[in-house]
Amino acid sequence: MSFLTCYIALAQETVWRDTLKAAVKTDARRIEASLGRLHTGIEGMRGVVSPLGEGDPTRWAQGLPGVATGADGTTSMYVRGGGSGNNLLSLDGVPVYGYSHILGLTTIIPTGTIESAALGKGGFDGAESNFTAAHLRVLTKTPGDTQKLTFSLNNFLAGVEVEGPIGNRLSYIVSARVSPLTWEYLAVRNALPDLLTGFDHFSASVGDVYGKVELQTGVRSTLDFSALGSLDRYDFGSPGISREMMGWQNILAQLRFRRNGDVTKIEVRASANMYENTQEQDKTYRNIMNRLTLRSLLDEFTLAGSLRHQFTPHFTLGEGVDTRYAIFAPGQSGKKMETTEVVLGGVWLQADYSIPEIVSLRAALRGHYYKNLKAESDRFDPEASLAVKVNLAKWLSLEVTGDRLMQYYHTLEGLPVGWSLDMIVPSGATVAPETALQGNAGLTASAGGHSFSAGGFYKKMDNLVYYKYAQSLFSGALTSWEEHVDIGKGTAYGGEFLYEYIGNDFYARAAYTLSKATRHDFAETNGGRPFHARFDRRHVLNATASWKGLSATFILQSGHWENGAAETYPMHIPGSIWEADYFAGINNYHMPTVIRLDLGYQFDFKTGRVQHNVNLGVCNVTNHFNPFMLYFDTATESWKEIALMPILPNFSWRITL
């Protein structure tokens, strides 16, 4: 309430009336396309209405064709029939394995540090690897040459950013954010105690810190060091019944050297990536208190280098190498940690050729050496990507992409809510790398302020890992995960459509996907018969329009099928194992259609030399109940539906000095 009061008081100032103007230009939302990728700048991301008042890279990507979400309102993505763990999100080239924040409402990457984002779904670059669905590539901005201080505040995060030069050759940017979730819970509980009767207590420790220092080592060369740390920890419980704790944390650091020569661009980088999640539960079931603790770790260290030679204005040749050393400790219970070490090395070669206004081509070959030190198994696998764009007319072009992809890290999906609680496990003696073979072809057209694209894709997947106890947040089976997975295949196909209009004050975009994704040949699941992939949605529509800062977004997604692992579903609690009916198997309970309408308003104003950027909005205006999964309530011994996002007013306020 105090945030809204501050805003109203500020709005009464005369200077506000004198300087109020539309903050978002219509072309800032525009999506740029190039050979299998869709790009946007920071304004395109911030313009998306979200529970935090401004969007982020995943919110932007969820509105693109070929992308379906998991739980309504969270950061999870399912692209062209792949699982959420088949996507890669990278920050300046470093993979981010636990990127969700605030229970999946946003990402751990501070928006004030972002320069751009690009979603690739096909025709991948030679340096991209270890995923089989999509790559959401996030790039941070170069620190500015003037001192700048920014304060930010929204529904769930408060932050500060500072950037500027140090002398003539050094510049920096630092960002820190913290969430007031615990205080907000206490305020609501005191003001509206009847609203939170299901909670005995709730506390949250949530925040992130990002820093980047860049040194100009020469006229054409730079050396930068960046680091990101994040923490999500939640502790809650019901009166006299249970206590639950869940949390995850990330530490990323990278040292990078870049040089732009007359012909050759050089990049060398070394990075460290440490991810951990923890789950604890005290649960009373049939008058017996049970406790379960699980912990999962992934530490990864990478050394990579690349050369890109611009031999002519139309021809570029690139090559590179990278080596990773990773330590996995998935699903550990108790104090003993069982670890698995792996080595993943790769080489790649890429050629880019173009004839302006006629044809563009990119071809990449990759080779990977993988060794699981615990299983004493190694292998070499080839990959390839191709992207071609041919201009059929000045206003019409044809684009074709094709890929053979490999993924050596598998995600055992838990609750499908976009939280970072999934277990990441390595390929080994019993689980081979996942593979994908895909193709896409489509037409793009433009006339005046209108642009349109339509295409179709087909994808075959093999060695997919299906975790049998995915619906259970806490399961002792995680400690022996290789004994509880089923291996099979997948198929996905569909059509993708994107329309944009850009006028002087008006902008509109509609993205529609018609698709089908199935899993089949899983010997122990559904008797080997095909079943729907997780969050397989036949229809996905995202439509948005904005006019002078006002915006509206409508989302419609087909309901997905719930998939159980067997006729009965085993629940694992130390001291007892029991079974509950889970609608008797696979594809036998259809969740309802997702429908959501979001409204927003953006504007800028100045008070003296201080710049203000304000986003106001309402998520889920119609308060539509969008359940996304079922869970077993031990108190009533019955299955119940879960939905996360009710109607939610939101705002974001950035003050730059």
Image (cartoon, helix red, strand yellow):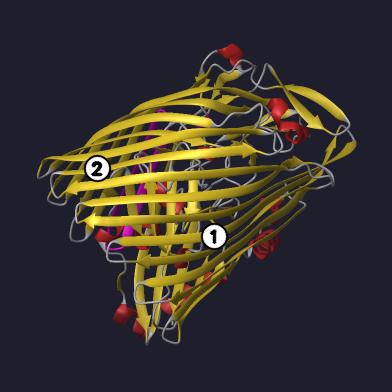
Residues drawn in magenta:
534-557
Q: Which disc number belongs to residue 361?
A: 2
Q: Quadrant of the C terminus?
A: bottom left
- How far apart are the two marked residues, 2 and 1, measured between alpha carbons? 30 Å
| Three-letter residue code for mark 1 | Ala
Residue 493: in sight, yes or no?
yes
Q: Amino acid at mark 2?
A: Leu
Are there few (<14), some (14-19), or many (20+) residues within 10 Å of tag 1?
A: some
x and y percent of residue 571 in the render? 76, 28
- Residue at 33 percent of width and 48 percent of height: 38
Which residue sits at x=41%, y=86%?
168
Residue 552 in the magenta stretch? The answer is: yes
Q: Tell me: residue 419, above or below residue 558.
A: below
Judge whether residue 63 can be spotted in this image.
Answer: no
Residue 353: mark: none
Q: Which residue is mark 1?
A: 270
Residue closest to the far left? 393
Q: Position of residue 481 (x, y in %)?
A: 71, 32
